[in-house]
């Protein structure tokens, strides 16, 4: 499907690089089965442009997003380019809130994956019953479901419930993660998605084995020992982009 594009005239190199990185991420999510029709959102701040960030064009599937079709908006939801696409208010309200108030929320990801929604709808949420879940023990915030996120006044409670954490399960709703970089946010989402998938599978078989707080503490302490240079998630995300390119590199345009 052909998609409308924003011209690169007078676009900074930083913006184009951000567009390419974010477009690649949408394609990776589509490849991994994390898309939800034309809904859900991944947003990315544009370096050097205070309050400006990129969001997916409302109406396109994740697999159709390209670097030039992404929509550039400001913190108040105003378009900053000549994109013909609208912006989903449910995405803007939530993401703009965090981009506005959290300087370290460079990239924000929100999805409705089956496993993520299932665990977010479970009393007690994510439990320390598998390797990936132990990564997040004590680090996940929870927010009660208040309906589709289109009302600005819900933002006060979202920020309050998030606190100093940067991973949240929106109860009865889905996954929300933030990162200082897009690859960091990607790795958080991938790990949380895996934790949820495994919890769903484990609970279908019977009573899960709970990992003790002492072992969780050792696990979290030692996780850095299995990271490679480049920053959190950098190598992981690069590997996924290479896989996407084997399928279709049209997202680069």
Image (cartoon, rainbow, N blue to C red):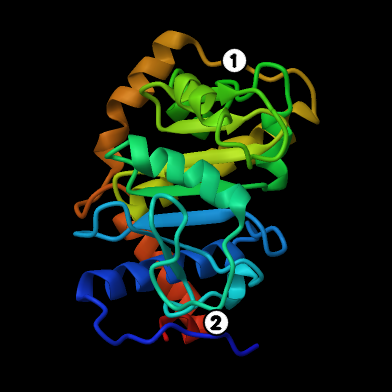
Q: Label 2 crowding class (10 Å Cα cut-off): few <14, some 14-19, many 20+?
A: few
The reply to whether residue 190 is visible in this rendering is no
Question: At 35% across and 25% down in the image, what residue appears?
Answer: 220
For the point 29% across and 28% down, the residue is 222
**In the image, farthest residue toward the bottom:** 2
x%, y% of residue 117? 70, 38
Residue, x 44% and y 55% (percent of image)?
43
**Which numbered disc, 1 or 2, marks the residue closer to the eye?**
2
**x and y, in percent, of residue 115 in the image:** 69, 41
Secondary element under disc 2, as helix, strand or loop, is helix
Residue annotated with mark 1 = 210
Q: Which residue is mark 2?
A: 247
Q: Is residue 189 above or below residue 245?
A: above
The answer to which of 8 and 105 lies nearer the viewer is: 8
Residue at image position (36%, 54%) is: 182
**Quadrant location, the C terminus:** bottom left
> For mark 1, does the 10 Å Cα neighbourhood hold few (<14), some (14 to 19), or many (20 or more) residues?
few
Front position in the image: 211 or 237 = 237
On the rendered structure, is 39 left or right of 159? right
Q: Nearer the viewer, residue 140 or 126?
A: 140
Q: Is residue 71 visible?
A: yes
Q: Which SS class for mark 1?
A: loop
């Amino acid at each position: 499907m052909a998609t409308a594009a924003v011209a690169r005239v007078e676009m900074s190199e930083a913006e184009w690089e951000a567009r390419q990185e974010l477009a690649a991420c949408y394609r990776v999510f589509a490849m991994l089965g994390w898309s939800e029709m034309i809904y859900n959102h991944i947003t990315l701040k544009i370096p050097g442009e205070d309050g400006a960030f990129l969001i997916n064009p409302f109406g396109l599937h994740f697999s159709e997003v390209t670097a030039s079709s992404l929509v550039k908006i400001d913190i108040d939801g105003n378009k900053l380019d000549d994109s013909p696409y609208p912006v989903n208010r449910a995405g803007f309200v939530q993401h703009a809130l965090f981009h506005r108030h959290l300087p370290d929320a460079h990239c924000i990801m929100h999805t409705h994956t089956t496993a993520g929604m299932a665990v977010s709808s479970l009393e007690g949420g994510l439990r320390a019953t598998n390797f990936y879940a132990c990564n997040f023990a004590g680090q996940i915030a929870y927010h009660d479901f208040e309906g589709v996120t289109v009302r600005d006044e819900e933002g006060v409670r979202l920020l309050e419930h998030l606190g100093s954490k940067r991973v949240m399960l929106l109860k009865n709703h889905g996954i929300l993660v933030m990162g200082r970089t897009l690859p960091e946010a990607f790795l958080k989402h991938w790990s949380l998605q895996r934790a949820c998938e495994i919890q769903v599978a484990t609970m279908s078989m019977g009573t899960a084995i709970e990992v003790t707080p002492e072992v969780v503490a050792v696990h979290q302490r030692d996780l850095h020992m299995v990271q490679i240079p480049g920053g959190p998630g950098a190598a992981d995300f690069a590997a996924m982009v290479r896989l996407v390119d084997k399928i279709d590199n049209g997202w680069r345009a």
